[in-house]
Image: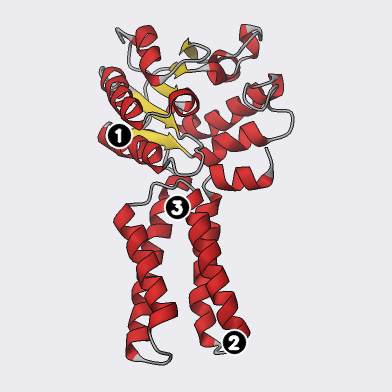
Amino acid sequence: MNSIAFHIASGDAFFSGSLMWLLAIAGQLLDRSWVRRLRILAAIVGTVLISLSSTAIPLISVITFLVIGIISIFICSPNTPQKRLAFILWFVISLFIVGYELRFRFPSPPQTLAGNRLIVIGDSITAGMNEPEEEKWPSLIAAQHQLQVTVLARPGATVSSIMKVVEPFEHQPSLVVLEIGGNDVLQDGSHAKFSHALQLLLEEVSKGGHRLVMVELPLPPFYNRFAATQRSLAARFNVKLIPKRDFLSVLATAGSTSDSLHLSKLGHERMAKMIWKHIGPTFR
């Protein structure tokens, strides 16, 4: 994966876009013609980056952020109370939306769980392709940390199709990791189907005192609604989210995939390490 694609799909573009807007706003301190041109360029680039990032920031916050920024740069006269007010409002809103997104970059671990049971629900990233079972990342976690692991995963699975594997979900209290949804984006792209299916899946697996963890989906541009659905349903069902940047970092690292998507032996090892970083405290 090239660096530009990673920057966009990981959500990093949101932060770099916000930085470009900060430079555009701060550039008003220098009233020179070449600085004015750079301010306009920075604002345009910042808007494009934020739009491409598919970040699930509340829409009203993003619109307010952009509108007040445009008013501050292009409409308000220099050195006026209106411009200073616009700058203060923009700065407060920018702190809110950047802080909002940072919460998902540094999530808290799930609550501790008595026992050593782990259930993994997933697609081919979890099920693998032709690897020996002991080389797949759930098996690696089980062997390295003495856990009892149940894998409910199928190559090519979508959120709706995995329900046939999951139901009925009758297990002792466990930590449940959901690595599912990528095929919904790649194959169908229907947000309505994805949202409905994910709600049904979380309703099913949230029964019985389980701790739930879900891997955030790295998304192509303008798929914000998928991200918003994951986050809203995660909040509703008390699901901890593993940041999409961490997941994408595994896929994007050289040698981790056999075909840019499915994990290689090394990729499974890296995936196991990344997942354990987030779920390990649950078993301590």
- Select label 1 or label 2 by which is in front: 2
The reply to whether callout 2 and callout 3 are in contact (CB within 8 Å) is no
- Select label 2 or label 3 by which is in front: 2
Looking at the picture, does residue 157 appear above or below residue 178? Answer: above
- Select label 3 or label 1 by which is in front: 1
As measured in the structure, the alpha-carbon distance from the residue carrying label 3 to the one carrying label 1 is 19 Å
Position of residue 76 in the picture relative to residue 249 (left or right): left
Looking at the picture, does residue 247 appear above or below residue 45? Answer: above
The residue beneath circle 2 is 33
Type of the residue with mark 3: Leu
Type of the residue with mark 2: Ser
The tag earlier along the polypeptide, 3 or 1, is 3
* Residue 23 visible, this angle: no
- In front of the other: 225 or 121: 225
The residue beneath circle 3 is 102
* Mark 2 neighbour density, 10 Å: few (under 14) some (14–19) many (20 or more): few
Residue at 55% in and 51% down = 12
* Residue 52 visible, this angle: yes
Position of residue 242 in the picture relative to residue 271 (left or right): left
The residue beneath circle 1 is 233
**Secondary structure under badge 2?**
helix
As measured in the structure, the alpha-carbon distance from the residue carrying label 1 to the one carrying label 2 is 48 Å
The picture places residue 54, in percent across and down from the top left corner, at 46, 45
The picture places residue 96, in percent across and down from the top left corner, at 36, 62
As measured in the structure, the alpha-carbon distance from the residue carrying label 2 to the one carrying label 3 is 35 Å
Type of the residue with mark 1: Leu
The tag earlier along the polypeptide, 1 or 2, is 2
Position of residue 44 in the picture relative to residue 193 (left or right): right
